[in-house]
Image (cartoon, rainbow, N blue to C red):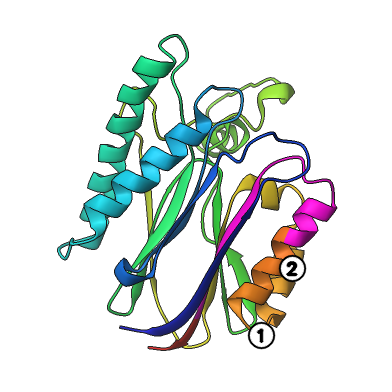
Amino acid sequence: MPSLRAAALTDIGRVRRKNEDRLLFVEKSMLFGVADGVGGLPGGAEAAQLTVTELTEALQAANGDVAKELNAAVQQANQAVSALGLRISPSMGIGTTLTFGCIRANTLTIAHVGDSRCYGSRDGEFLRLTEDHSVENEARLRRARGEVIYYHEANRNALTRCIGQPTPPEVDIINRVLLPGDRYLFCTDGVTRMLPDSELGELLMESPDPKSALDQIIGLAVRRGGPDNATGVAIFVDAV
């Protein structure tokens, strides 16, 4: 098992009346990530909390094929959130984003649905490892395949996938073999809408420890207006 340091931080921000973000932070099971209740729908906090609870229970004792286990756990969480949505919001449902990682041996396996993000840094290079599941990104990918796609500018950031949708969501699975010095950041859009990737990279790579990185990143998102809940999990890999 790699030697690492990790920290988590969430802030309600300056506008929202409640925090609908949730942290997935179970060091014993090496589970790290974030869930962000879908804005505009009721029950966002309930959707995010149920998702985190389901994943924690499903993955605590898992030890087989990690990608299959993560996908199965996400589908299980989706079913649970969808069922809850039928009870508390039958006309609209409820939903949440989900971006998290599970570390086994020397590999980080990331599962991603929605527009929360995971970033990674290695040898001075900072990369966004996930793609937002938004109307704008979906249109860009389909246009690259030669399709003619139009969308209203007002809907560009609307989600095309979330936990809680009636059909099983397609889950992006990303594998990263860990190396000493790697740093990873999971965060919600309350962070990424306030800090550009270039600034996130500088803060993550220059901070001495994960707590300091999150204090700066979440603090900046809030000081710049804090229009949304801001949540992050940072992982620093010291040895593999």
Of the residues shown, which amino acid type is indicated by label 1?
Answer: Pro
Residue identifier under label 1: 208
**Residue 229 within the segment the image draws in magenta:** yes
Q: Report the Cα–Cα distance between label 2 and label 1.
A: 12 Å
* For the residues bearing labels 2 and 1, Cβ distance under 8 angstroms: no
Q: Under tag 2, what secondary structure?
A: helix
Residue 57 visible in this rendered orientation of the protein: yes
| The N terminus lies in quadrant | bottom left
Left or right of 159, for residue 63 = left
Instruction: Name the residue rendered at 79%, 59% in the picture.
Output: 220
Of the residues shown, which amino acid type is indicated by label 2?
Answer: Gln
Left or right of 239, for residue 18 = right
Instruction: Name the residue rendered at 35%, 38% in the picture.
Output: 170
Residue identifier under label 2: 216
The percent position of residue 39, horizontal first and vertical second, equals 60, 29
**Residue 65 within the segment the image draws in magenta:** no
For marks 2 and 1, the one nearer the N-term is: 1
| The C terminus lies in quadrant | bottom left
Instruction: Name the residue rendered at 32%, 80% in the picture.
Output: 106
The percent position of residue 210, horizontal first and vertical second, equals 59, 75
Q: Quadrant of residue 75?
A: top left
The percent position of residue 188, horizontal first and vertical second, equals 60, 49
Q: Vertical placement of 205 versus 239: above or below?
A: above
Give the residues in magenta: 219-236
Residue 195 visible in this rendered orientation of the protein: no
